Structures are given as structure tokens and as C-alpha cells.
Image: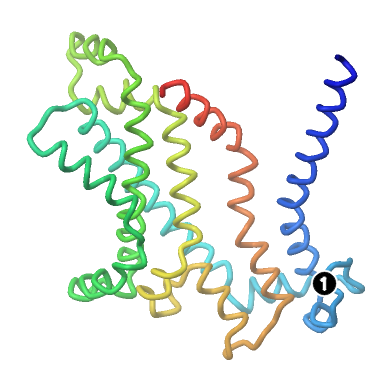
Amino acid sequence: MRIRQKWIKGILTVIFGICAATSVYPLLWMLINSFKDTSEIMTGESFGLPHVWKFANYTDAIFNRDILKFFVNSIIVTGFTLLLTVTAAIMLSYALTRMQWKLSVHVSKMVTLGILLPSQIVIVPIFMMLREMRLINNPLSLILTISAFNIAMATLMCSSFLSGIPLEMEEAAVMDGAGIFTILFRVIVPMIKPAVATMCINTFINSWNEFIYALVLISGEKYRTLPIALMNYSSGKYGTDYGGMYAAMVITSILPVLLFVFFSNQVEKTFSAGAILK
């Protein structure tokens, strides 16, 4: 019996090791190619170590291609999107799960519909609406649009956690004289930290990687974000610089990778807690 368990454990370890390797290898491949010259990559030697380590790809991306400026633009858009999305989702989920009001059922259905609605099919009316508001080529247009498409998922995620919190917690706070916002942000929010963390990670990834709306709504270079800036490496403006493009991609991936490294355990705990609440 023990021998059989060891065999099963060994097989599972090999399978999980292969899955981990297939996930990590693309990042390692991108990192290695970021130190190569374009000619070396194009000659079919993109899978080995570089013959000459070309650190100039990073200096070119930082000082000549203004990748840091676009990095800051992405941080600004993502930061305000996080703040708006998470705050609105927490307040809306609290209103839907804890309050009784006339249109709560209809609003709940609209939130569910927001998850099923592909963002690409409404790109034309959103562009026309923002153009009438004179928000084209303004970071606010990108912040509002990305937040609107992320609020629905964040609200349902937060609502599933709120439904598992006993009402006695809020009743005790009311007896102590706490108002609705005090109850929400000082009693409820600390109890749903796993949900808040997962909402932040999900919103961060969607905002950081947004390409379609960033391409349509931001026309100038001043407010351009990283996904659009990376496109310049294969455009006619700069030519096809694969080594520099991989270096810029490494810089772009630093923040998401660090986010996963430090918060992966939190996401796992959130999924486990959600299963328990169900």
C-alpha cells in the first residue's frame, strides 16, 4: 500500500513539475532573448543562451524608447482603476446583499449581465459617448471604461463573501452607534480581505494588460500605456527590434510577476474560503 502511494506521489510530482516548467519557461525564454541581438534571434538561435550579452537592449528601452514614461502611465491608470473598481464593488455588493430596496433585484440582474457582455461589442458606442464628453486621449476615459467592465465580476465576487457573514456582526456595530459607512469599511471590509485581495489582483491584471480600449481611446503618445508602447517595436516607426522588444516585455512583466509571487497564497485562500461559503 505504501509503495503504491509513493508511486502515485511520484507520478503526480512529475506531472505538476512538467506543468510548472511549461508555465515558467516562456518567461525564461523571454528573459534570455532580451539580451540578444535581433539578428541572432532571427537566425533560429532564440532557444539558447546569447553569444554576446547585449545589455544595450535595456538601456535603449529605458532611455531611447521612453518605456519608463509608459510604465508610469500604466501605473497611474491601473492605480485609479483599482481604487474606483474595488470601492464601487464593495459598496454595490453591500447594497445588494444587506439592503432591501425597490430596484435591487433588477440591479443584481444587470450586474450579472455585465459579466456576460463582451467588452468588444460596445467599443463603438463607448467611443462616441466619450468623444461627446471630450475625454478621448485622456487617461480618465481609460480608467472609467476599464472600471466599468470590471465592477460586475468584482461585485459578484464580493457578494459571495458578504452573504456568508452573519448579520449579528452588523447588529452589534449598530448597537454601538456605528453608521452605515463605519460598519462597511471598519467592520465588513476587514472580514472580507481575501475577496478584496482577489478583486485587486483580477482588476490589476485586466487593467495592466488592456490593449483594445487603450489603442482606441488614447491617440497621443503622452498618455500611452505599456501594451500600446510595445506595439511600436514592430511598427514602421522603429522597425522590428526583437531584442529591444523582449527587453521592454521583461520590464512590463516585472510588476505582474512580483504580484503573483507575493499574493498567490492569498488567491488560493480566497478560492478555498469561497468553496466553504458555498
Residue occupying the point 30% across, 28% down: 185
Quadrant of the rendering where the N terminus is positioned: top right
Quick check: 121 left or right of 51? left
On screen, 141 above or below 188?
Answer: below
Quadrant of the rendering where the C terminus is positioned: top left
On screen, 126 above or below 236?
Answer: above
**Viewer-closest of 2 and 51:** 2
Q: Tell me residue 122's x, y (percent).
A: 29, 67
Residue occupying the point 77% across, 57% down: 28
**Viewer-closest of 202 and 61:** 202
Q: Tell me residue 117's x, y (percent).
A: 32, 57
Q: Residues within 10 Å of mark 1 (few under 14, many from 20)?
A: some
Q: In which quarter of the image is residue 125?
A: bottom left
The residue to which callout 1 is attached is 46
Q: Tell me residue 184's x, y (percent).
A: 27, 26
Name the residue type under label 1: Ser
On screen, 104 above or below 172?
Answer: below
